[in-house]
Image (cartoon, grey):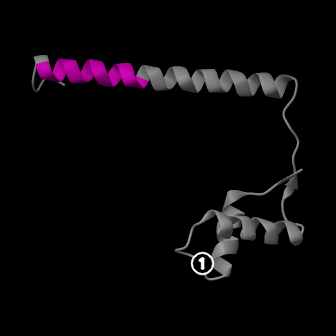
Amino acid sequence: MTLINSYAVKQNREQHMMRRQKTDPIDVAAIGDLLRRGEGSPFQPLSGVYLQLQHLDRVRLGKVKMRTMLKNQIIGHLDRIFPGLV
């Protein structure tokens, strides 16, 4: 398996004068062109400690998102109850 960077696909589309066009067939053609030229890097799935760190990071990001949502709700309620306080 080979990993292709999405920015490389965008650059490839721009080289072929398809800047404003973004469709699946055009993206597939750009990816195919990059693979044909040998661009990309081998895919190495995470394992062991790195996989565990990825899971923990996703849990952390979810909790940070939840905290931000709750904070915004509290600020919104305070602003409605005490206008101009916040």
Residue 30 lies, with reference to residue 59, above or below; the image says: below
Pick the residue in front: 25 or 22.
Answer: 25
For the C terminus, the quadrant is top left
Spot occupied by residue 59 in the image (x, y as percentages of width and height)? 62, 21
* Residue shown at 13% from the left, 22% from the top: 80
Asked which quadrant contains residue 22, the reply is: bottom right
- Mark 1 residue element: loop
Looking at the rendered structure, the kind of residue marked 1 is Met
Left or right, 54 with reference to 73: right
Residue 71 in percent (x, y) is at 34, 21
Picture residue at 86% right of the left edge, 55% below the top: 41
Q: Position of residue 84 (x, y in %)?
A: 10, 27
Image quarter of residue 45: top right
79 inside magenta stretch: yes
Q: Is residue 70 magenta?
A: yes
Q: Which residues are magenta?
A: 68-80
Q: Which residue is mark 1?
A: 18
Residue in the picture at 54% in, 24% down: 62
For residue 80, side relative to residue 9 (left or right) = left
Q: Is residue 83 above or below residue 17?
A: above
Looking at the image, which is closer to me, 31 or 75? 31
